[in-house]
């Protein structure tokens, strides 16, 4: 068991802006409507006291989140406190100059609430779309992360790499309100990513969507050891996790509401990746106390988050509410319950320990 962090626990929402077929009717929400729903979700999340809202970048028909900073900016002027982040930015196939500019603009509009979560991404569609080769998968990320960090560190940048034209003493604007603009490393569980983040002294976010979350404890240890070796204080570095889940009035209601769309989308992805069929037995097993699905009534979801904190020492938890398209009113109610019921239970329980 990892030593629990002494940092405050943040709770928020992550989404890929799902626009998948309704598992019952087969109807498909338009990308435009899903984008407008996202803005409503962010405003509500801010109103009910949640700490962060993150949008993942994907370039497929079943997701609407190709430009997270634009969607987040639409809600920035309508919110006051909530932090606004990508979850993730597929840095390997993007231009770090434009990534910084987009999120520093968001930082200005929100008056210092923007963040970037940089990752390779769990899908590969962006690579051919933007003219990159998967043969350069690792090298692209390392090089572009280096440039992004150079840009956030200095107004004028001189840099040379192998996959992007060199920059010779050029300024990148606008500059962010926050100094520095927060950059996280997002990982699906790659040990090299954990070590890299630790060495750089960057916060890390783990996507935990299967198995038992406690199995990530060795990665947290690797991360902290790497940070310490590089001269960073490992106890001051934030650690986040992102997991699928849903909050309902009762655990049975939550489980029944979340299953159909989750099963449908997990099976779409599973067919692409050669996973076994996703059925109710697998789903119910993952809903157990030690499983990776955070589905249930507020008390049960809070209990699971507290356990996660104690096992991994996390400082931020993202609940990924939509795996596939769900009725908007149900999503809004789950966000409301997360902010008004789950978060207060978590904070109260952690204050005792």
Image (tube, rainbow, N blue to C red):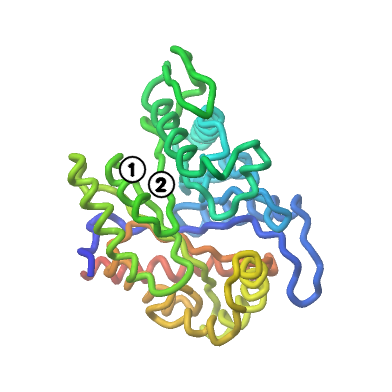
Residue corresponding to mark 1 = 202
Query: Which circle's residue, 2 or 1, is located before the other in the chain?
Result: 2
Residue 120 is at least partly visible in this image: yes
Vertical placement of 212 versus 63: above or below?
below
Residue 300 in percent (x, y) is at 42, 79
Residue 11 is at least partly visible in this image: no
Q: How far apart in space, not on screen, are marks 2 and 1 (Cα)?
A: 7 Å
Q: Quadrant of the C terminus?
A: bottom left
Residue corresponding to mark 2 = 185
Residue 291 in percent (x, y) is at 42, 77
Q: Quadrant of residue 79?
A: top right
The residue furthest front is 135
Vertical placement of 309 versus 57: above or below?
below
Q: Quadrant of the N terminus?
A: bottom left
Q: Nearer the viewer, residue 150 or 293?
A: 150
- SS class, disc 2: strand
Could you tell me if the residues under marks 2 and 1 are in contact, i.e. CB atoms within 8 Å? Answer: yes
């Amino acid at each position: 068991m990892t030593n629990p962090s002494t940092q405050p626990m943040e709770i928020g929402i992550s989404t890929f802006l799902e626009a998948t077929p309704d598992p019952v009717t087969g109807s498909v929400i338009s990308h435009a409507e899903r984008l407008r729903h996202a803005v409503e979700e962010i405003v509500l999340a801010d109103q009910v006291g949640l700490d962060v809202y993150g949008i993942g970048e994907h370039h497929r028909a079943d997701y609407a989140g190709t430009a997270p900073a634009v969607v987040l900016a639409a809600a920035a002027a309508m919110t006051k406190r909530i932090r606004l982040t990508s979850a993730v930015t597929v840095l390997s196939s993007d231009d770090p100059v434009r990534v910084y500019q987009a999120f520093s603009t968001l930082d200005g509009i929100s008056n210092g609430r923007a963040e970037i979560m940089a990752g390779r991404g769990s899908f590969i569609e962006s690579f051919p779309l933007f003219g990159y080769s998967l043969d350069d998968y690792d090298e692209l990320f390392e090089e572009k992360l280096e440039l992004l960090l150079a840009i956030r560190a200095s107004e004028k940048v001189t840099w040379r790499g192998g996959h992007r034209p060199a920059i010779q003493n050029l300024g990148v604007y606008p500059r962010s309100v926050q100094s520095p603009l927060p950059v996280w490393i997002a990982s699906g569980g790659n040990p090299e990513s954990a070590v890299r983040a630790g060495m750089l002294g960057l916060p890390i976010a783990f996507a935990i969507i299967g198995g038992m979350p406690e199995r990530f404890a060795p990665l947290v240890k690797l991360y902290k050891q790497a940070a310490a070796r590089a001269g960073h204080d490992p106890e001051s570095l934030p650690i986040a996790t992102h997991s699928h889940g849903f909050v309902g009035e009762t655990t049975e209601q939550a489980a029944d509401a979340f299953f159909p769309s989750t099963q449908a989308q997990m099976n779409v992805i599973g067919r692409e990746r050669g996973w076994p069929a996703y059925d109710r037995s697998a789903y119910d097993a993952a809903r157990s106390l030690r499983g990776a699905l955070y589905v249930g009534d507020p008390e049960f979801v809070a209990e699971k988050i507290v356990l996660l904190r104690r096992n991994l020492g996390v400082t931020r938890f993202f609940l990924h509410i939509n795996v596939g398209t769900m009725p908007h009113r149900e999503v809004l109610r789950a966000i409301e319950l997360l902010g008004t019921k789950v978060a207060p239970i978590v904070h109260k329980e952690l204050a005792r320990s």
